[in-house]
Amino acid sequence: MKSRCNARNVAIFLSFCFAIVLVASWTKMSDGTWNVPTNDDNPHYRLQISDKMALAECQGKLKQTSKMSAISSAGNGPKELPEILEPLANKELKPPGEASPEEELERIWNYMYQRQYHCTESKYLGGQPSGPFKGDGAYDLCVEKQFWPQGGDKAKCLVYSFGINNDFSFDDEMAKLGCEVHSFDPSMTLADNSVTNTGVIFHKIGISNEDNDSGFNGWKMRTLKTLIKELGHEDRHLDFLKVDTDRGDGTGFEDVVMQELLETGLYKCVRQFSFELHMPGPLTQPRLLNRCRLLYRQMRALNDGGWRLYNTTDNVRWYKAQVNQDYTQRSNKNDIVKGGGAVILWESSFVNFEVTGTCKEVLSR
Ligand SMILES: *[C@@H]1O[C@H](CO)[C@@H](O)[C@H](O)[C@H]1NC(C)=O
Ligand SMILES: *[C@@H]1O[C@H](CO)[C@@H](O)[C@H](O)[C@H]1NC(C)=O
């Protein structure tokens, strides 16, 4: 929520149509039927929904990958890959368009509070040191050797951090650990390629689902895949990917990033992912309800690819400061179905059990 009251928050509004296409395609992929909302007031929605992306295929591949690596690692001793619970499994969630906002919300809510892995040693790095927003801008790093193989790695760790809003506290901490840190935020006035005194390299570029030198607000936008190429990191692993960006409508780009990771296969070269999930209401609005479903599906697909959620914290700092001290996420839960203006903000972290190659290797597969 580092956003809302500041510049980063200022809409990095990337054409909605793309998000809509993504939502539409994912709905298709996951459930085999199109979710065609009946009361969406966006005229583009129906046009874009016919756009096809071979996502079902993508999920098929993910499942296969999971099985294959389970087999290939069988001979190498036990590998802890904890089982995932399916929230509402015994209730069998209805097909898209039929599940109510309450049911969809309940499902992702239960999912976010499952700890799928217990990281025995983590660090909470950066963040505001004091005041009502204490901890805002801090992210979890799991320092277990299997997810943070610093000593063993030939190259030093590589970190991409999206959404800075002039707060480099986390990025600086990662740089102090010896990492090569690249920080991205097109909404800041800091000059492109500036370097902080800890060595963090700043890029005045936004993350997007398309490359555009003059995208929204005239900002330079890039996909993750293009950035990895342009920065010359194809032969590396992405040791830590942080995404905390705001779109200006209460949502963020986390769905866009997870979609790209899944479609390109880049999730296989990312060791850790820490992000803020933004979920505004009203979930009675098909676009937002579909986004809620999409986020859940994406995280499940990442689970199939070997990712495990190991921490979720409620970011209710703003509500505590502005509404009342006793505010909890549950108050937002009641609010976002009908849309009283609240946004659910979860800060969550995944570790990847199945890193299979450098970014170039996983892309060319
Ligand atoms: C999640 O991370 C926060 C910040 O590091 C920590 O306070 C909390 O105990 C963690 N929760 C779990 C379940 O590990
Ligand atoms: C780049 O972004 C601008 C502003 O959103 C848009 O008008 C333009 O069509 C985009 N260009 C491409 C090549 O997508």
Image (cartoon, rainbow, N blue to C red):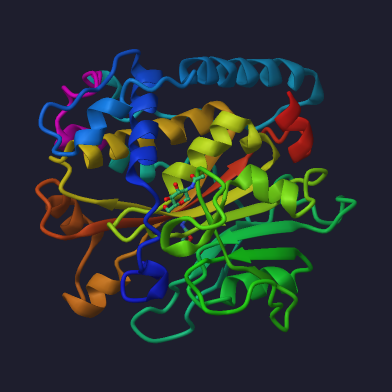
Is residue 27 rendered to the left or right of residue 232?
A: left
Residue at 75% x, 76% y is 199
Is 95 within the magenta?
Answer: yes
Q: Is residue 321 above or below residue 4?
A: below
Residue at 23% x, 27% y is 46
Front residue of 356 and 79: 356
Is residue 338 rendered to the left or right of residue 226?
A: left
Q: What stretch of residues is rendered in magenta?
A: 92-107
Q: Furthest residue to the bottom?
A: 131
Residue at 24% x, 42% y is 288
Where the C terminus falls, by quadrant? top right
Front residue of 158 and 145: 158
Where the N terminus falls, by quadrant? bottom left
Q: Is residue 267 above or below residue 24?
A: below
Is residue 52 rendered to the left or right of residue 189?
A: left
Q: Position of residue 33 (x, y in %)?
A: 30, 14
Q: Position of residue 174 (x, y in %)?
A: 68, 68
Q: Is residue 271 visible?
A: no
